[in-house]
Image: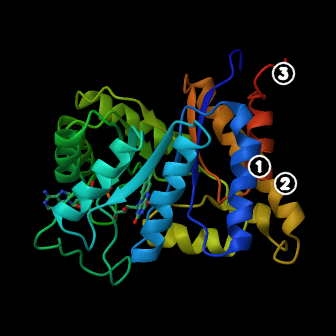
Amino acid sequence: MTTSPVVSFEFFPPKSEDMERRLWECVQRLTPLRPQFVSVTYGAGGSTRERTHSIVRQLAQDRGLPAAGHITCVAATREEIDDVLRGYWESGVRRIVALRGDPVSGIGSRYEPHPGGYAYAADLIAGARRIGQFDISVGCYPEIHPEASSLADEIDNLKRKIDAGADRAITQFFFDPSVYLRFVDGVRKAGVNVPIIPGIMLQSNFKGLRRMAAMCGASIPERIATLYDGLDEDPETRDLVTAHVAADLCNRLAEQGVAEFHFYTMNRPGLSLSTCRLLGVRQHGESI
Ligand code: FAD
């Protein structure tokens, strides 16, 4: 790789003081890599949502970072969502990741739009555009969303979101570069030209990763699964394997011209730092 790629980092809102310390350590250690943006995910419950808003505001106001708040359509009226968006805009948050969200009763159950809410991500994007000129990212699914009937259906839905005003899409995690490249090819043929940023998973708990992959329809190639064989009790080696797998995937994509990556950090700075280092992303001012 000749020039180092552009990176962004995704965090989740902490549930305890200990986890909150870990989040801020993560932010502090990753900030020198000058991410294009950092984002914070959004849960289903009221207190989780408040934590997301508060962390996003702190990232933007106290740390001066390009912070993006994830926001979903689930279990909220349009007015409630619009209030959150206005609150972000007023506190200087200029980026959001606009999502439909998963059904309140869990992934796999039937999604029912809130009667007074935004039904799907495309509707939420149109609503956000009425409130401010946010930079809007959306989700997309190279192995198709579990509710999409085909790749064409998946791409049609992405196109609706871009037409509604989204600026880029971030992919669900995947492990096979050809899955991403095929998807982007289809997206471009459909006339969608916004950046499609690969979402790179840094989950070194392999059992947890398998559960997540099964729920969201992402496949884990056997060649990767076998790397974790026998490591259930060895988190240190799993971390090394995870950073290597992620960097290998990014480097293979970079060979095909991909120059931006979004990391699902799991609030673990070491994994993101080592992966970025393997990609040639260094701290500001540090020579490669
Ligand atoms: P949409 O793009 O709205 O669509 C999902 C599916 O709904 C489509 O495949 C289609 O089958 C159907 N659909 C869409 N429009 C219509 C329509 N008009 N009529 C009928 N059916 C329609 N979840 C969270 O809860 N919090 C987060 O912070 C979060 N962050 C994420 C970040 C990324 C990068 C990604 C990829 C996902 C994230 N998710 C998050 C998960 C996401 O909420 C789920 O995958 C959800 O099931 C779909 O959201 P979406 O925005 O992609 O949905």
Q: Is residue 62 visible?
A: yes
Q: Secondary structure at mark 3?
A: loop
Q: Which residue: 57% across, 37% down?
A: 65
Residue 88: % across, % down: 37, 48
Marks 3 and 2 sit apart, C-alpha to C-alpha, by 23 Å
- Which quarter of the picture shows residue 104? bottom left
Q: Is residue 184 left or right of residue 189?
A: right
Question: Callout 1: helix, strand or loop?
Answer: helix
Which image quadrant: the N terminus?
top right
Q: What's the residue at 68%, 32% (across, down)?
A: 251
Label 2 is placed on what type of residue?
Answer: Leu
Q: How many marks?
A: 3
Which residue in the protein does label 2 denote? 240
Residue that badge 1 annotates = 243
**Whether label 1 touches label 2, CB < 8 Å:** yes
Q: Is mark 3 within 8 Å of ligand 1?
A: no
Of callouts 1 and 3, the N-terminal one: 1
Q: Which amino acid type corresponds to the residue marked 1 in the rendered image?
A: Ala
User: Residue at point 81% right, 55% down?
Assistant: 241
- Foreground: 24 or 180? 24
Q: Quadrant of the C terminus?
A: top right
**Residue 286's disc number:** 3
Q: Position of residue 179 (x, y in %)?
A: 48, 45
How packed mark 2 is, by other alpha carbons closer than 10 Å (few <14, some 14-19, many 20 or more), is some
Q: Which residue type carries mark 3?
A: Glu
- Of callouts 3 and 2, which one flags the residue occurring earlier in the amino acid sequence? 2
Please indicate whether residue 211 sits to the left or right of residue 180 in the image: right
